[in-house]
Image: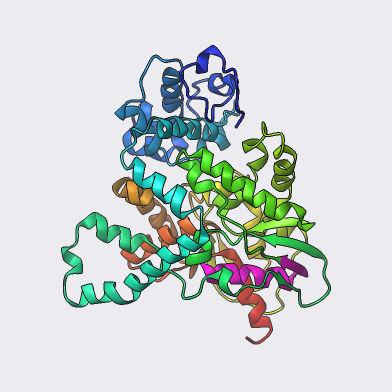
Amino acid sequence: MTHKKDPKALLQHFHEVEIPDDDILTQCMHCGLCLPVCPTYSLTGMERSSPRGRIRLIKEVAAGHLEISKTFIEEMYFCLDCQACVTVCPAGVKYGQLVEAARSQIYESGKEPGFWIKKFFFRSVFTSFGRLKLLARLIRFYQKYVEPLLHKLGIYRLLPRRLRSMQELAPRISGKFFDDYIPERSMPRDQVRYRVGMLTGCLMNIMFSDINADTAEVLQWNDCEVITPKLQVCCGSLAAHNGDFEIAKTLARQNIDIFFNLNLDAIVINSAGCSAFMKEYGQLLVNEADYCEKAAKISQITLDVSEFLLKNNLKIPSQTFNRRVTYHDACHLIHTQGISQQPRQLLKLIPGLEFIELDEASWCCGSAGIYNLTRYDDSMKILNRKIENIKKTGADFVVTGNPGCMGQLAYGLKKANLPIQVLHPITLLNQAYKNAQGK
């Protein structure tokens, strides 16, 4: 997102934090092609809840014709930022930049409900893996000991519905955190063809450490020397998506300092939101003389794990794996990064795997970061549509490449009493490799 020191008249009432170029605001032709793919418009049928409606709201606030009102805040956060509209837009409107710029204005105003809670977590917890892991250990203790006791005593059902839904949606904390046991340097089983850096992520590290372990092993199967720096930090995407660009940039600079001098062929990431954001580091820091070139280089070598493996001719497992599999497109893979075929090709290369295409595979699942916690009812309406489509496939597994989607889909399938397991594509590939080795 381009930062202007002398914004044009159209943007004169925006705080000078993260503002887009004027031409992004004026590109929208109001053609309406975005309407059928917008999940929130499908729920309400209201123009203001569509991408072009929100663009008009942003224009009016930017020009000073409207205040940052309750309605404006409601619409900017009712949006899932799935960016399906970007994929279909004939004018190439970068809607994601607009809605995140609007959220940065809301953040600067301090008018958003729960502002101080968000600010505390983004600035005091997600900026430190030590503090994040301490919080995770407390949650793990609750999940392991307190929650079962509440169920046993019949107290759990007396909790407010919102609190129960938050607990049920939250993934289980991993028994071991990935960065506690992975060495900084892991060697491949055969010769070294590639030297890659691996982002541990924040939530991936504490909630999905098994997927991180699968990723490291798959990279080793494919002749990669894997470098996992211990001092790396959160990529910054969570803060940026919620309007705190100051912290997002701070975290980006720290990661650039850590990864830049490692002489890497690629930085490989297994979380769609993280890879999407690190690919935007160059844009995020374009006006910072000390970091613009480094940031652009980091963005250039950042790849989703399926993208990296397909680009470099992944090794095909030798053992058949007889399962029926369908695939859900994570929004930050298909719409932000344009990655759709690579995960499907990866799955189809596993011998014996029967791939079943999912209807509306690119329709958002309703997770959208913390959307399923802050807007639970809307999120569930969107999720139900996804679950109905998954049910039709008769698949054994539904596969997706983003942790938020994985948790959301698992929750929906459990509610629907469907015996379908949710997996990351890399977990499935690693199991196929292990089957070939008799493990």
Residue in front for this viewpoint, 220 or 42: 220
Q: Check residue 209 for magenta coloring.
A: yes
In this view, the residue in front, 258 or 173, is: 258
- Residue at (57% x, 18% y) in the render: 7
Against 56, is 218 above or below?
below
Residue 59 at what x, y percent from top left? 46, 20
Quarter of the image for the N terminus: give it: top right
Residue at 60% over, 21% down = 5
The residue nearer to you, when weighing 50 against 371, is: 371
Residue 341 image point, x, y percent: 65, 53
Residue drawn at x 57%, y 44% is: 250
Picture coordinates of residue 35, whole percent (x, y): 44, 32
Residue 240 visible, this orientation: yes
| Segment colored magenta | 208-226
Asked if residue 329 is positioned above or below residue 143 in the image, the reply reads above
Q: Main secondary structure of the magenta part?
A: helix
- Whether residue 354 appears in magenta in the rendering, the answer is no
Q: Is residue 76 above or below residue 144?
A: above
Residue 334 visible: no
- 151 relative position to 187: left or right: left
State the quadrant of the C terminus.
Answer: bottom right
Camera-side residue of 392 and 27: 27
Identify the image's colour scheme: rainbow, by chain, secondary structure or one colour. Answer: rainbow
Q: How many marks?
A: 0
Residue found farthest to the bottom: 438
Identify the residue at horizontal 45%, vertical 15% (top origin): 63
Q: Position of residue 42 (x, y in %)?
A: 37, 38
